[in-house]
Amino acid sequence: MSCKKTSIGGQALIEGIMMRGPKRSVMAVRKKDGSIDISERKFTDLKAKYPILKLPIIRGVAGFIESMTVGYKAMMDSAEISGYLDEEELKKEAEKKDTSKLMAVITVIASVLAVILSVGLFIYLPSLAFKGVNYLAGGVLSPLQSLFEGILKIIIFLGYMYAVSLMKDIDRVFSYHGAEHKTIFCYEAGEELTVENVRCKGRFHPRCGTSFMILMLIVSIFVTFILDAIVPWIKGILWARTIIKLLLVPVICGIGYELIKICGKYDNILTRIVAAPGLWIQRITVKEPDDSMIEIAIAAMKEVVPENTDEDNWQ
């Protein structure tokens, strides 16, 4: 039995899982009649199309945008295939498609509002909160601004993830998340992809989207520390600090991506320390799956496993 590291990654969907391998991306979804629908997901490989996007840091930003775009579409398709949307909802969706121009405008507005909310919660609010607390403390907390803001962002993120995990439908998605991780571990262990083999594998994987988000929040603390050291005057100007932190998001995203890749590729004391916060947080977003969910993960995994096991595809 051989052990190997793979670049294969996945995403939990509504009653399904999407697996993305070196050559193709496939979605497996459980239909209402109990059968499994398997479909290939076509996507534009930005890094193959634009070689500059393969450069370190930059590839992380490209990969994040690509995964968000492909993932959102897969989630919507899985809802329809699984029967999660009832007939009335499907009719509404069809009506929406008939008014595509109006929906395009609404989608843009919704996206803008979502970005504004994210900026407000994770960038502006922590800075504003620190300003108030530091004022009450007489200004003695100024050297700790980056740490305070970073911890508050992590608390907000954890609170949000815990709140959504209480929803029944989301809880099932998180269980599919566990099936995805267990199946990848089984493949990496070089074992046959069977329900029995997958079931006994661990459910916390270092190359997880949750770990990536936490790493980004932690990296943002260090990046902001550096920012404050280089331009200390910015600490007192809330709007300017917010704008600069926004401009640094791609850098933070890129660094987080590189760290996740390293943690997934190597296993040593350093990578274990870096991966530890993300693995701990996965207790919220990665639940134990049942056998039917594991079957879905295996079905998707078998479709993306390369013909040979030489997968030097960590770009």
Image (tube, helix red, strand yellow):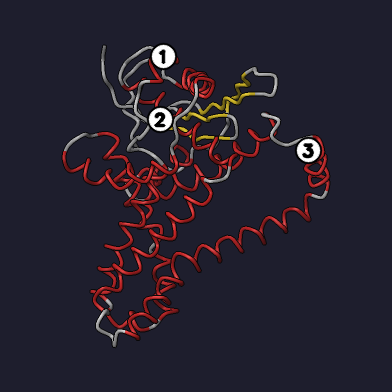
- Residue 48: image location, x then y, percent: 44, 37
Residue lying at the far left of the rendered structure = 269
Figure disc tally:
3
Q: Amino acid at mark 3?
A: Leu
User: On residue 90, which mark appears?
Assistant: 3
Picture quadrant where residue 156 is located: bottom left
Residue at 33 percent across and 61 percent down: it is 220
Residue at 32 percent across and 69 percent down: it is 148
Name the secondary structure under disc 3: helix
Distance between mark 3 and mark 2 Cα atoms: 31 Å
- Please state which of the two labelled residues, at mark 1 or mark 2, is closer to the viewer: 1
Distance between mark 1 and mark 2 Cα atoms: 15 Å
Q: Decide: marks 1, 2 in contact (CB < 8 A)?
A: no
Residue at 50 percent across and 43 percent down: it is 66
- Label 1 Cα crowd, 10 Å radius (few <14 / some 14-19 / many 20+): few
Which mark sits nearer the N-terminus, 3 or 2?
3
The quadrant of the rendering that contains the C terminus is: top left
Which mark sits nearer the N-terminus, 1 or 3?
3
Q: Is residue 130 above or below residue 171?
A: below
Q: Is residue 236 above or below residue 81?
A: below
Which mark sits nearer the N-terminus, 1 or 2?
2
- Residue 252: image location, x then y, percent: 35, 57
Q: Which residue is mark 1?
A: 196
The quadrant of the rendering that contains the N terminus is: top left
Q: Which residue is mark 2?
A: 181
- Label 3 Cα crowd, 10 Å radius (few <14 / some 14-19 / many 20+): some
Name the secondary structure under disc 2: helix
Q: Amino acid at mark 1?
A: Glu
Distance between mark 1 and mark 3 Cα atoms: 37 Å
